[in-house]
Image: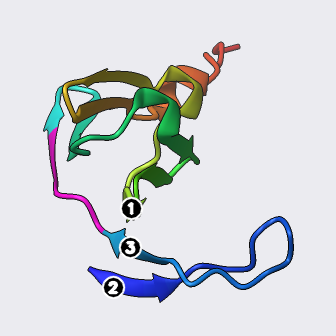
């Protein structure tokens, strides 16, 4: 956990507030063609969670009070970003990534 000084407010005045930057606890495992990630975000409202998924990278930002949760993960495998599923209950975020299978985009080649 790190203490960081907040940037200038909307009015341009320097705030004397401090925020804690925290890497949340998480677990990850695989099931068949899925990668499952479970992240602990205690006290965070669903509206305060922002996620981005690239083909092999995942970013999470969430905040509550004076705490900012930040998680950046290199997935080391390609996933299909638009097939990502999420569920958030009682401070526990579950993310399910579908692994990219290059054979799904392969063409059948006829023999002449």
Residue 93: x %, y % from top left: 27, 33
Q: Quadrant of residue 7?
A: bottom right
Of 82 and 62, nearer the camera is 62
What numbered label is drawn on residue 21? 3
Q: Which residue occupies 38% across, 73% down?
A: 21
Q: Is residue 47 magenta?
A: no
Q: Are marks 3 and 2 in contact (CB under 8 Å)?
A: yes
Q: Nearer the viewer, mark 1 or mark 2?
A: 2
What numbered label is drawn on residue 73? 1
Q: Secondary structure at mark 2?
A: strand
For the residues labelled 3 and 1, the Cα–Cα distance comes to 16 Å
Magenta highlight range: 23-29
Q: Is residue 26 magenta?
A: yes
Q: Which residue occupies 57% across, 45% down?
A: 52
Q: Which residue occupies 26% across, 45% down?
A: 41
Q: Nearer the viewer, mark 3 or mark 1?
A: 3
Reading the chain from its start, which is encountered first: label 3 or label 2? 2
Residue indicated by mark 2: 2
Of 85 and 21, nearer the camera is 21
Q: Quadrant of the N terminus?
A: bottom left
Reading the chain from its start, which is encountered first: label 3 or label 1? 3
Q: Are marks 1 and 2 in contact (CB under 8 Å)?
A: no
């Amino acid at each position: 956990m790190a203490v960081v000084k907040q940037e200038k407010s909307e009015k341009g005045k320097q705030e004397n507030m401090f925020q804690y930057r925290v890497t949340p606890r998480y677990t990850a495992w695989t099931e068949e063609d899925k990668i499952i990630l479970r992240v602990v975000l205690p006290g965070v409202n669903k509206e305060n969670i922002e996620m981005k998924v690239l083909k092999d990278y995942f970013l999470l930002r969430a905040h509550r009070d004076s705490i900012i949760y930040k998680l950046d993960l290199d997935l080391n495998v390609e996933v299909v970003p638009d097939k990502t599923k999420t569920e958030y209950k009682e401070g526990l975020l579950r993310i399910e990534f579908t692994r990219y299978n290059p054979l799904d985009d392969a063409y059948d080649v006829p023999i002449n």
